[in-house]
Image (cartoon, rainbow, N blue to C red):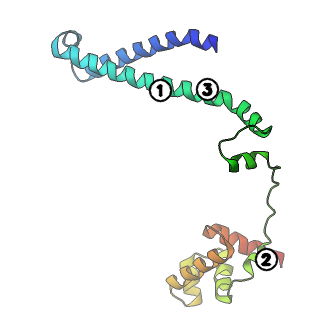
Amino acid sequence: MARRDRRLPKVVLASVAVCVAGAIGDQAAAGHSLQWMLNGAGQDTLINEIVDLCASAALVFAAISLLRRSIAGAPASLAATRSGGPSLTPALAAAVRAEPVGLLGRADPAALVEPLTSSERRILALLADGLAPKQAAHQLGVALPTVRSHISAAKRKTGARTLEQLVGLYAEASSDS
């Protein structure tokens, strides 16, 4: 930590230099001469811009410093909580002390597809064969909104979030049986 503290003034000075250079560059890009920047209204504008940039840099350094301190103390805080020390909340303390949870088992695709109606299964079979919903609607002689309604119902029943998940689940269940 002491080493970082010795570097801090150098970093601050470098940041101020970058802010000054940036402010001068901004004014030069706006078409102002160096003479204008150093006298009268240009001087006030330049100083205001430098102060704004330095204040922003100071806020960034303060945030970085705060984050470094928080991150540095996290392992010790976690170890203390695990050994029975105080925690932020009782629920967090219980979660930290709990035994690690193994991965959840994967659901059986056939069991997930079982509650689907025959219409939903027919549509999923066509989609699994590579047809688009519009093509499935045409082949079954139903309207596209009907197909979309069956797809929505099937997603709700199986827990699939996307059409790809739903079709993949149906294809996997079909290959198992």
Q: Nearer the viewer, mark 3 or mark 2?
A: 3
Say which element carries label 2.
Answer: helix
Which numbered tag is attached to residue 60?
1
Q: Residues within 10 Å of mark 2 (few under 14, many from 20)?
A: some
Mark 2, residue position: 110
Instruction: State whether residue 85 is above or below residue 58.
Output: below
Dot in front, 1 or 3: 3
Q: Which of the two labelled residues, at mark 1 and mark 2, occupies the earlier sequence position?
A: 1
Is the C-beta separation of discs 1 and 3 under 8 Å? no
> Could you tell me which secondary element the residue under label 3 belongs to?
helix
Is residue 42 visible from the viewing direction of this image? yes
- First of labels 3, 2 by sequence position: 3
From the top left corner, tell me how far across and down residue 84 is, in percent.
Answer: 78, 39
Percent from the top left, x then y, of residue 173? 77, 75
Left/right placement of residue 49 relative to residue 59 reads left
Find numbered disc 1 in the image and state the secondary structure of the residue it sits on. helix
| Horizontal side, residue 53 vs residue 107: left or right | left
Q: CA separation, marks 3 and 2?
A: 51 Å
The residues tagged by marks 1 and 2 sit, at their Cα atoms, a distance apart of 54 Å
Distance from the alpha carbon under mark 1 to that under mark 3: 14 Å
Residue shown at the point (47%, 14%) measured from the top left: 12
| Crowd band around label 3 with a 10 angstrom C-alpha radius: few (<14), some (14–19), many (20+) | few
Dividing the picture into quadrants, the one containing residue 170 is: bottom right
Q: Which residue is mark 3?
A: 69
For this rendering, which residue is in front, 26 or 4?
Answer: 4
> Which corner quadrant holds the C terminus?
bottom right
Instruction: Give the quadrant of residue 13.
Output: top left
State the image coordinates of residue 100 (x, y, percent, origin top left): 81, 49
* Mark seen at residue 75: none
Mark earlier in primary sequence (1, 3): 1
